[in-house]
Image (cartoon, rainbow, N blue to C red):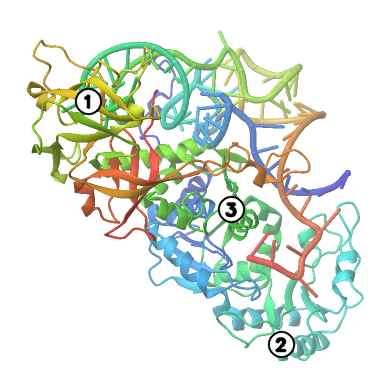
Amino acid sequence: MNKPNNSNNKAAPKTNEKAPAEGANFLKQIIEKDLESGKVKEVVTRFPPEPNGYLHLGHAKSICLNFGLAQEYGGRCHLRFDDTNPETEDTEYVESIMNDVKWLGYDWGKNLFYASDYFEEIYQWAEQLIKDGKAYVDSQNEEEVRLNRGDFTHPGKNSPFRERSVEENLDLFRRMRAGEFAEGQHILRAKIDMASPNMNMRDPLMYRIRKAHHHRTGDKWCIYPMYDYAHPLSDAKEMITHSICTLEFQDHRPFYDWCVENVDVPGEPHQYEFARMNMTYFVMSKRKLLQLVKEGLVNGWDDPRMPTISAARRRGYTPESIRRFAKRIGVSKAESLIEFDILEACVRDHLDEISHRAMAVLNPVKVVITNLPEGHKETILSSVHPKNADLGKRELSFTKEVYIDASDFMENPTEDFFRLGPGKEVRLRNAYVIKCNEVIKDASGQIKELRCEYFVETLGGKPLADGRKVKGIVHWVSAADCVDAEVRLYGRLFKTAHPEDVPAGQDFKSNLNPDSLKIIKNAKLEKSLAKATLENRYQFERVGYFCLDNKDSKPESLVFNMVVDLASSH
RNA sequence: UGGGGUAUCGUCAAGUUGGUAAGACAACAGAUUUUGAUUCUGUCAUUCGCAGGUUCGAGUCCUGCUACCCCAUCCA
């Protein structure tokens, strides 16, 4: 890399003409090729969740991918709810999903759709398929269907109903729609190939009878299309060009294409698959997350330790940090396990840029400054952000009694500890250097207060009178002029990087980290924090990034969440 | 077992008519610093799952092998 470029190669120029296309990936290449060849004029993608649960970071990757691609190539991205299974879906979820997508910073504009809006059309297309002899009503029961599907090594067997006449199929299908039959009595299947090596092509199901209430269509329908049949047609109807989904649908692509080819739909969408995201110290499966919620192992779907988007929001992650994360991890078809560190790095990256600085003492120890008069109070001005003067200044109260954090004092300091100890000097950040002259303990031997002297000449970062500088710097808060708050510290939800790797007989919950939540009831915050807002992020200097809790914080009783701690080389 | 995929640094990931291994996170070392933060600098794949072959030259082409993932829900 640092080798001089003695270009002896004939076709020299292509080295770094173009800035490396940021995050080049196989999807962009496909899109660029399609655009170039004129195969597509405008890129149209879609994010198609089923409204049956809360979105997590894996979905965030997909959202950023689909909306990001559309944005990048000047196209559009639809939000479509794949609500073809009435039994699992609910409007509660469509609302939370819309909320999450919006929060991530994406706008679907007018392009909000529901597969259920297409039910009539999808039904008509099915009738056409019947008329074309490409679909039939099968009256085997569930068990028979399964048995006759064969398995990996054995081809399936044709249904005895496979050769029904078009008229009979049509009649039956219409009566299915009319509600004449019980659930399970009939299904509609595509007539493809029961011997196909691809199980998905062994006459896949198109419709099943479900006498269930649908969250949008109510009781209008009692037959519902299967995902595999409805999805390609919905894509085609919306003129989607690139239908991006996860790897497990690769085997479904042949049927996807079959539908697009055999139904007279507008558009010619193509399906492309990428690897879903897994992350260390987390589980992503809906089922497992549900277990954690149901069993009370976390405090709901938006518990800040959860990998859901609502949890990320409550935790204080910014949409920007998640977008950066999605970009940084890239997209490919290789099975991947992303390190949680990358997410945290992205969060710190963004938060460092925008966070208001403040001091907060989580485990207070009282420091009495002996050479200050009783009742002394002076105001010190400090910047809200060290590199962004636009954020202005904040006022600190310096008084005779202050708090420092217990972890910044060591009675018998080790060699590499350069904060406070008996006889040691340390700088109170933004203020003066102090020296600890006396340690006062209570009867039980607990440190009650530290009696220190301060050095007037050291304000503003100046050295001591004899020219010495002190290395240690600690944060502090005025005991007389501060605000109390509850502070919640979060650790990783699981104590192991691969919570699902578990000895036989145990389950992933045995890997839960018992110390993932620590609540500090009486933290002492500098007074400027009394005006903290939900929108802003705060860096408690030398501790971490924090934000107000969007559920529990009240103006008169503040609750802060730790978003992420500060990276530490010690 | 049949089909479909994937294999490049600890973790992601670029690498596209074969031309001599980007970047990020992590780690380590150092500089700056009123945050043991940030910032900055340096180190970190003689090697691309393995074995052969083609070629002046292969991560990229050919052959064989291995490992892992997905598929047999009237779920999505």
The quarter of the rendered structure image containing the C terminus of chain A is top left
Report in which chain the residue with disc 2 lies. Answer: A
Q: Residues within 10 Å of mark 1 (few under 14, many from 20)?
A: many
- Secondary structure state at the residue bearing disc 2: helix
Q: Earlier in the sequence, mark 3 or mark 1?
A: 3
Towards the viewer: A470 or A84: A470
Position of A63 compared to A363: left or right? right
Q: In which quadrant of the rendered view does residue A219 lie?
A: bottom right
Report in which chain the residue with disc 3 lies. Answer: A
- Residue at the spot x=53%, y=36% of the render? A339
Q: Does residue A546 sit above or below B27 in this rendering?
A: below
Q: Earlier in the sequence, mark 2 or mark 3?
A: 2
Disc 3: which residue = A297
Position of B69 compared to A419: left or right? right
Q: Identify the amino acid type marked 3.
A: Leu
Q: Identify the amino acid type marked 2.
A: Arg
Label 2 close to label 3 by CB (< 8 Å): no
Do the dots labelled 3 and 1 sit on one chain?
yes
Which percent across, then down, holds residue A55? 52, 59
- Residue at the spot x=35%, y=20% of the render? A411
Q: For marks 1 and 2, give the CA distance.
A: 84 Å
Q: Which mark is residue A451?
A: 1
Disc 2: which residue = A177
Q: Residues within 10 Å of mark 2 (few under 14, many from 20)?
A: some
3 vs 1, front mark: 1
Q: In which quadrant of the rendered view does residue B64 lie?
A: top right
